[in-house]
Image: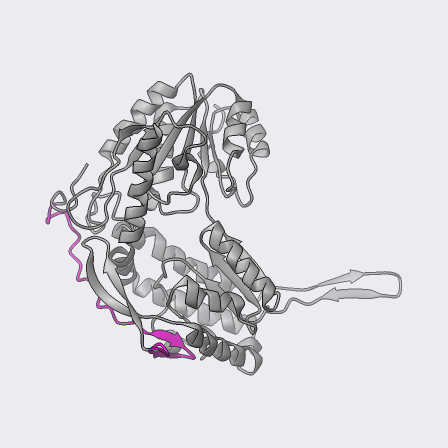
């Protein structure tokens, strides 16, 4: 396992001029502006723990200005009155712009959030561009419906925009926040307020002139957002909350493939993903062999500078999350779980944590119950299908699940029995042979 402070050879590091931090202000009504209060907060490079810039800290007053700009753009501006084709064409240009700056955007993600540069360049940023293209293509394909109510009467549906929508997103993503005005995004249509949950986020959730709010984050804050939406103007709410996703591996699984799926399922993006397979349940017939494979793969998983193309695991996003993950690891050891590998920082600077595997885990342990949001796997053994289903459903989360088996009947039966709110990661399943 590499020491990121000295283990990544300079020769291996991608030769890239790091981007200049240009856009640190709020973006309101087509202009980059300082926050109303003049306050700002530090942005730290998780690779080193060093300051890379200060970003404007938005508050209630800034949210109010952004909402006024958006409301004016929606009620009186040309954007809602453009045809779907015209709006789609502008979004296509924005997608092209993202692709023109793919290396710069991927590098920003690396120095801001510790994401792998190679993955950002090949996957994250192109996917952002493709997202714009998808919705651009859909813009002129949203149609209503005519329904025959009776012999004399017809009813029809007309799909219209919701209005002003506030998105509370985690760990702000830089794609598309530059040069939007030059590419046709009209003033007030897109507004960006950087800030913190108790201030800017709370102002969005409770604002009387926002028609809908979406939030991605923890269940605890999701409840606060729902309450604020209900007690303000009963705005519509969309939530994507935390996960503690189970991965169930049956005796008939290919052990090498199952181990690889389990490792990727938790270590993708350093475990900082809501659908991470953090709870792994293994049928007793292959438990010992699979655990051995998992430990081998975890020890071989290279941790280091995200600009090193040989690295698979960069630093955690910030010091607070880094310390929180380490505190969960210490709690797991105190509760009696067996630490098989990892469990400590990697290197002497930055926020790197070794891939960590716990065995002998009990269902009432904190590391088994809480979303850690880091590179920590808990392992439990099971005998029967019924036991696996019971363990998988023993959670207050319900976001995702994975199944590894060659038996399609088992896969279908288990997938119907697990209580999942949003998705089942059937990609974990092997087809029958």
Between 409 and 292, the one lying in front of the other is: 292
User: In the rendered image of this protein, does residue 432 appear above or below residue 428?
Assistant: above
User: What's drawn in magenta, residue-wise?
Assistant: 9-37
Whether residue 70 is in magenta: the answer is: no
Q: Residue lying farthest top? A: 285
Q: Position of residue 122 (x, y in %)?
A: 31, 52
Q: Residue at x 56, y 76 (%)?
A: 80
Quarter of image, res 378 = top left
Our reading of the magenta stretch's main secondary structure is loop
In the rendered view of the protein, which quadrant contains the N terminus? top left
Quarter of image, res 251 = top left
In the rendered structure, the answer to whether residue 38 lies left or right of residue 136 reads left
Q: Position of residue 411 (x, y in %)?
A: 53, 29
- Asked if residue 278 shows in the view, the reply is no
- Asked if residue 97 shows in the view, the reply is yes
Between 252 and 359, the one lying in front of the other is: 359
Q: Residue lying farthest right? A: 151
Q: Position of residue 348 (x, y in %)?
A: 15, 46
Q: Residue at x 58, y 69 (%)?
A: 211
Between 245 and 406, the one lying in front of the other is: 245
User: In the rendered image of this protein, does residue 183 appear above or below residue 347?
Assistant: below
User: In the rendered image of this protein, does residue 261 appear above or below residue 213?
Assistant: above
Q: Position of residue 416 (x, y in %)?
A: 59, 33
Between 357 and 285, the one lying in front of the other is: 357
């Amino acid at each position: 396992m590499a020491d990121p402070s000295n283990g990544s050879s300079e020769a291996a590091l991608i030769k890239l001029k790091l981007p200049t931090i240009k856009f640190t202000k709020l973006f309101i009504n087509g202009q980059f502006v300082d926050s109303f209060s003049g306050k700002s907060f530090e942005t730290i490079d998780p690779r080193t723990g060093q300051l890379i810039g200060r970003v404007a800290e938005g508050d209630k007053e800034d949210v109010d200005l952004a909402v006024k700009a958006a409301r004016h753009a929606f009620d009186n501006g040309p954007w809602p009155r453009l045809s779907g084709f015209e709006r789609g064409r502008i979004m296509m240009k924005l997608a092209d712009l993202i692709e023109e700056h793919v290396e710069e955007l991927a590098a920003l993600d690396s120095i801001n959030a510790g994401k792998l540069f190679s993955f950002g360049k090949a996957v994250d940023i192109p996917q952002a561009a493709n997202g714009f293209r998808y919705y651009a293509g859909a813009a002129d394909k949203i149609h209503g419906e005519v329904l025959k109510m009776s012999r004399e009467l017809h009813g029809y549906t007309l799909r219209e925009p919701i209005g002003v929508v506030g998105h509370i997103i985690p760990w702000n993503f830089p794609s598309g926040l530059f040069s939007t005005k030059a590419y046709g995004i009209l003033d007030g249509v897109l507004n960006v307020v950087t800030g913190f949950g108790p201030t800017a986020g709370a102002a969005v959730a409770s604002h009387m002139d926002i028609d809908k709010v979406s939030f991605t984050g923890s269940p605890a804050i999701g409840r606060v957002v729902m309450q604020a939406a209900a007690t303000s103007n009963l705005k519509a709410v969309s939530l994507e909350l935390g996960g503690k996703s189970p991965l169930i591996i049956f005796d008939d699984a290919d052990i090498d493939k199952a181990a690889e799926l389990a490792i990727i399922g938790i270590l993708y993006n350093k475990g900082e993903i809501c659908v991470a397979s953090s709870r792994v349940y293994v049928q007793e017939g292959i438990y010992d062999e699979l655990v051995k494979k998992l430990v081998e793969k975890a020890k071989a998983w290279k941790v280091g500078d995200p600009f090193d193309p040989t690295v698979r695991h960069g630093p955690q996003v910030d010091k607070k999350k880094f310390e929180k993950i380490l505190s969960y690891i210490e709690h797991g050891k105190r509760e009696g779980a067996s630490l098989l590998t990892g469990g400590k920082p990697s290197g002497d600077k930055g926020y790197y944590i070794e891939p960590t595997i716990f065995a002998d885990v009990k269902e009432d342990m904190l590391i088994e119950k809480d979303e850690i949001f880091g590179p920590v796997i808990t392992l439990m053994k099971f005998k029967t299908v019924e036991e696996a289903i019971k363990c998988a459903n023993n959670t207050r989360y319900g976001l995702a699940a994975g199944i590894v088996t060659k038996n399609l009947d088992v896969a279908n039966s288990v997938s119907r029995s697990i209580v999942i709110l949003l998705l089942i990661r059937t990609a974990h399943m092997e087809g029958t042979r």
